[in-house]
Amino acid sequence: MKNPRSSRTRALCTALLGATLFHATLLMASPAPDHGAEPTDSGTNSPDQLLQLIENRLGGQDAIDGLQSLHVVAECSGPDGAFTTQVDSQRPDRTYLRQEGSDFTMELWTTVDRTWGRNPAGVLVNAPPGARSMARGHEFHLLFLELGERFSDFAVAGSSEVGDRPCTQMTMTDEDGYPASICVAEDGLPLELVLNTPGAAGAVRVKPTAWNNINNVLFVQAFVLSEGPDRQFTYDYVEIQPDALPDHDWTPPPG
């Protein structure tokens, strides 16, 4: 169906996999945590109520739980030019990530036990620490759909605003223990996801600009990603295919 993550880790990943870029969650200097715009009051919704509101808005528990896999391809742009991003997610814990630009190709496979990629010679090799988090950090659709599973320590911070839209801000902790937040419109639609990846150029802000209802699940169709004050990326999904995963060999290399 056609429609619309310490500098050492980065160096290791680049040398190992032959990539020249790792977009969106990689790694320069550790900023202070950022939870988005300053909240103005405590609001009335509890974290459980907000999580339920988001779930209902994005399709409801039955429709979301029924999603077994997801294949997506995005046309992307960033400070270093255009590139494509392919993410294949086999729930609950397998991810394939491929990014390709004019002068680089990067592939990663990750399971709950192992993460590996392809070196410049085309040989499968084990990936360095941090690669799994980086790959899963590109599952932007599932970050929203699996909010209650991928994050913890939820707390309502109060009322805020994204652009000119009011929203309720909720702070949380990501899978690796780092602070994050999400701002949710009154109707449950997420307006901004803020991640604080160690070593990033600043807070990573994901602002959806379009959504697409496919099989009764609301998927992010496009978003703008800002990393710190100066780095901005756009992702526009040209393929979103629920439960139509390409064949992958999930057998890791020896070692």
Image: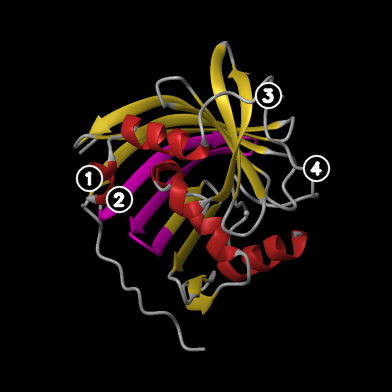
Q: Amino acid at mark 3?
A: Pro
Q: Is residue 174 magenta?
A: no
| 138 vs 252: above or below | above
- Give yes or no for contact between labels 3 and 4 (Cβ–Cβ under 8 Å): no
Secondary element at tag 3: loop
The residue indicated by pointer 4 is 32
The residue identified by callout 1 is 62
Q: Quadrant of residue 196?
A: top right
Residue at left 36%, top 62%? 92
Q: Along the polypeptide, which appears first: circle 3 or circle 2?
A: 3
- Callout 1: few (<14), some (14-19), or many (20+) C-alpha neighbours within 10 Å? few
Q: Earlier in the sequence, mark 3 or mark 1?
A: 3
In the rendered structure, the answer to whether residue 135 lies left or right of residue 24 reads left
Q: Residue at x 43, y 70 (%)?
A: 111
Q: Secondary structure at mark 1?
A: helix
**Pick the front one: 175 or 81:** 175
Instruction: Give amino acid for label 2.
Output: Leu
| 152 on left or right of 179 | left
Q: Nearer the viewer, mark 4 or mark 1?
A: 1
Label 3 neighbourhood size at 10 Å, few (<14), some (14-19), many (20+)? some
Q: Residue at x 42, y 79 (%)?
A: 252
Residue 114 in view:
yes
Report crowding for label 2: few under 14, some 14 to 19, many 20 or more residues within 10 A (C-alpha): many
Q: Secondary structure at mark 4?
A: loop
Q: Earlier in the sequence, mark 3 or mark 4?
A: 4
Q: Amino acid at mark 4?
A: Ala
> Which region is colored magenta?
68-96
Residue ID for mark 2: 70
**Badge 3 is on which residue?**
39
